[in-house]
Amino acid sequence: MSKALSDLKLGEKATITSITAPLPIKQRFMDMGLVKGSQVAIEKLAPLGNPIQISLKGYSLCIRKEDAQYILIA
């Protein structure tokens, strides 16, 4: 069973297996480098858990937890 990026805990790492978002959101993710096969790690969580800061390909990125649910990981 696939897990969503939003399910990862602080410091955990994973690999993106697919993105289930509607096309406009999926395209935005791809523009930011969030593509199948990318390694991601949770760097920071906001006090209420939203947004989350992730690292991938040598840079950091903040995304909303609602959007992170579209990113499936292994």
Image (spheres, helix red, strand yellow):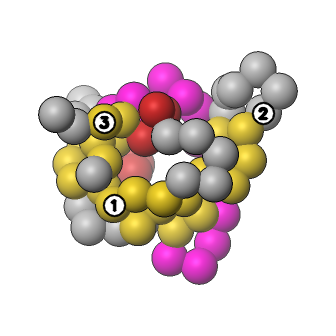
Q: Residue 15, how many percent across, how many down?
A: 33, 60
Q: Is residue 27 visible?
A: no
Q: Residue 2, how many percent across, how many down?
A: 22, 37
Q: Distance between the Cα atoms at labels 3 and 1?
A: 11 Å
Q: Point out the frontmost of discs 3 and 2.
A: 3
Q: Distance between the Cα atoms at labels 1 and 2?
A: 22 Å
- For label 2, the residue is 46
Q: Quadrant of residue 46?
A: top right
Q: Residue 30, how many percent across, how many down?
A: 34, 58
Q: Residue 42, how many percent across, how many down?
A: 60, 52
Q: Which residues are magenta?
A: 57-70
User: Going 73% across and 38% down the picture, which residue do you hit?
Assistant: 45
Q: Residues within 10 Å of mark 2 (few under 14, many from 20)?
A: few
Give whichever of discs 1 and 2 has the lower sequence position. Answer: 1
Labels in figure, total = 3
Tag 2 secondary structure: loop
Residue 59 falls within the magenta-colored stretch: yes
Amino acid type of the residue tagged 1 in the rendering: Thr
User: Going 76% across and 20% down the picture, which residue do you hit?
Assistant: 48
User: Going 48% across and 59% down the picture, which residue do you hit?
Assistant: 13
Left or right of 5: which side holds 9?
A: right
Q: Residues within 10 Å of mark 1 (few under 14, many from 20)?
A: some
